[in-house]
Image (cartoon, coloured by chain):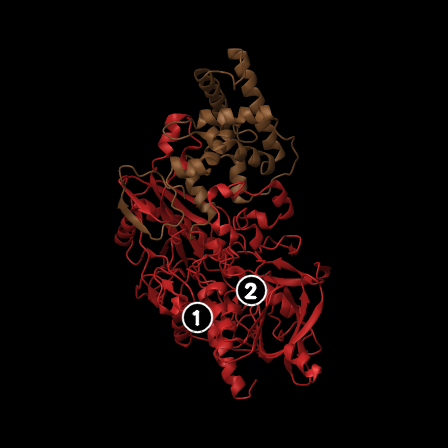
Amino acid sequence: MTINRREAVQRVAALMGGMISAPAMAGIMGQKTNNGTFVSFTADQTTLIASIADVIIPTTKTPGAKAAGAEKFIINVVQDCYTKAEQETFYAGLTKLDADCKTKTGKGFVEANEIQKKEVLTACMLEGDAARKAKKGTAPFFFMIKELATTGYFTSKIGATEALEYLPIPGKFDGCMPLGPNQKTWTL
Amino acid sequence: MNLNIDAIKTITYDAIVVGSGVSGGYAAKELTEKGMRTLVLDRGKQMEHITGYEPSYKDPWDFKYNGLLTQEQKASHPKLSRDYPYNEMTEKYWMNDSDSLYKEEKRFDWYRPNIVGGKSIMWGRQTYRLSDIDFEANVKEGIAVDWPIRYNEISPWYSYVEKHVGISGEALGLAQLPDSEFLKPMDMYCVEKEVRKRIEKNFPGRIMTIGRVANLSEAKQAQLGVGRSACQYRNKCRLGCPYGAYFSSQSCTLPPAAKTGLLTLRPDSLVSEIIYDATKQRAKGVRVIDTVTHEVKEYYAKVIFVCGSTVSTTALLLNSKSNRFQNGFGNDSGELGHNLMDHHFKIGATGTWEGDEDKYYIGRRPNGIYIPRYRNIGNDKRDYVRGFGYQGSGSRSGWNRGIGDLNFGADYKESLTHPGPWGMSLGGFGETLPYHENKMYLDPMTKDKWGMPVVVFDAEFKENERKMRKDIMNDAGEMLEAAGLKNVKAFDNGSYPGMAIHEMGTARMGRDPKTSVLNGNNQVHACKNVFVTDGACMTSTSCVNPSLTYMALTARAADFAVKEMKKKHL
């Protein structure tokens, strides 16, 4: 590749208005981060993560994040790639989201109905946006899980081959052709 | 039967080649094809062509972290993990930091492969010829020493290797960037085609072309004959190509060498020393440490090609001390280890492109665009010397574009299943001057696990490079703006020597043995049966990617060496 990964990331970040979460950026850009250990996720927490991911990437014409098993990727990255500080942010955010949901609806996030889930996650998103603008500490929890759910989903077999179009061996290159009416985004 | 003679025969060859990367592989091919029994020694593990490229067969969902490094990998690779080439997918191709100890008086990113074929597997494959503007620059400007060769001496050798390697690109007839023997050029994205027109219209003298790349846009007999096939546009080159569709030692030079029946390839073989025979005043062989068993062996040959990559080659020469060479092999000039150079980069501009929403592409092009050097050429005069070229690419954003947006849910998901806006980026690669004080040396007090003294780096970019970087960033922004890109953002991510993995210059070629290590045939001035044909030999860096020049110089030096052997001069 002539554009190295850092430049590609910069380009993507530029297109996104400069927002990409710190851990992914640190990982992609190979910055040194602090090592730390973190308790593994319980079965309940795993279900909670899958449930949040499924609100971010729900089943539509194609299966959603939960069906694609995106929580496995989320947990892998948080456990193994995140720094201790990032893990703490993620864990605290996860706990707070569930607690906020209980306060608001009387039910945990997993048990809440779809409308309630969206409301609670929207509040979490707006909190995250405020924190992001204040630029303190790690990326906010919402943007962490949004990024992980999105990446986990679109790189899963279901996401990559059903929601997107995956051509493992294109066999040719045409750089300038009409976009077909049913053409989906390339996975890669 | 005389066992002793047999034993000596198995450790004695016509030629020994240290390293099996771009240069070493080429030396192996040329020497064996000219009838030399050749031993190739590589410190890396065996990497079989096709079957060895395990990560290249994986789908996105087969990677646990989608390429990210774990905290454990970062902790065990504090230096290697500072930049992108080392990641989840390429983990096994690079040496561990703990095996690759080195010290930094100033930051230097040293990427050391851990496989046969070396960086020819992971390289960027951009292939450009140097020109006389490059070969004459030092002497015209009174900088460092003159190259001992000119373009007309290397030009036939460029052609020779290009026909075998297969270089895809577009002929332009430029003095500063001579054309190669081209396979058909790869296509451009719509945005690139339009930006090209607008740059060439707005900035006379600046040209944007498709990258010249060692990928087979088409496979001709020269390539089919060694079992290679055309590019499948997977863009997984860095993981090794099962189609042999780009140049690597495994795809392109080791198979023809093996076919001669004269090649012996020994992986896990760290060459610790070149053995000098004071009586005969020539090198008699090399000492080798088996990286697995730590067993020490010696091998002997009439000629030795040192192609271990710039830093490792130089470390080997510095470590090869004798009464004759007390400061390192062939180091009468004192220049060995000095003049360490790398291109400076990670600077340019990006922008978004409004339009072409109804256009898309098929295939993943393993290549980008190239803007050849235009500064300090002809009447253009800047407040620095030399110049830079740009690599870049158009792109259409995909599913990861909305991560930072304030949204989620069905609409968010559905929007990402359609392609996003187009964009374009340019990144400069600038020439770095040869400064005597930019150097590497050995620390005899610190040894690695094989008992080798570790390398210390003391090199930095200086004023000339800093001034050039201002132009690189401003010009990139100006060109994108003039070409109609929106949201143009110039960037300078900072560049440290080593990061471009174009390290060069530490055993430079020159006309005078007092100021250079090698002569115009890549021979060590003071020991004619030792040749150095990797990046260490470079007298200046040009601004173009250097590997093609290593191939051409290697083929040329091998031809010279064999002719000299036949004349009994070696």
**What residue does disc 1 label?**
B135
Q: What percent of the width, then of the height, locates residue B178?
A: 35, 67
Relative to residue B166, is residue B98 depicted above or below?
above
Q: What percent of the width, then of the height, locates residue B308?
A: 57, 66
In the rendered image, the quadrant that contains the C terminus of chain A is top left
Amino acid on which disc 1 is placed: Phe
- Tag 1, which secondary structure? helix
Report crowding for label 2: few under 14, some 14 to 19, many 20 or more residues within 10 A (C-alpha): many
Q: What percent of the width, then of the height, locates residue B169?
A: 34, 61
Measure the alpha-carbon separation of dots 1 and 2: 21 Å
Labelled disc at residue B1 = none
Amino acid on which disc 2 is placed: Ser
Q: What percent of the width, then of the height, locates residue B24?
A: 53, 69
- Tag 2, which secondary structure? loop
Say which of B478 and A186 sits in front.
Answer: A186
Could you say which quadrant of the image residue B384 lies in? bottom left
Q: Tell me the colour chain A is drawn in.
A: brown
Nearer to us of marks 1 and 2 is 2
| Residue B279 is at least partly visible in this image | yes
Say which of B459 and A177 sits in front.
Answer: A177
Say which of B432 and B163 sits in front.
Answer: B163
Label 1 resides on the chain identified as B
Could you say which quadrant of the image residue B313 lies in? bottom right
Residue visible at 34% across and 35% down?
A: B418
Report crowding for label 1: few under 14, some 14 to 19, many 20 or more residues within 10 A (C-alpha): many
User: In the current view of this chain or complex, which residue is farthest to the right?
Assistant: B445
Relative to residue B48, is residue A141 depicted above or below?
above
> Do the residues marked 1 and 2 share a common chain?
yes
Residue visible at 45% across and 42% down?
A: A10
**What residue does disc 2 label?**
B309
Q: Tell me the colour chain B is drawn in.
A: red
Q: First in sequence: mark 1 or mark 2?
A: 1
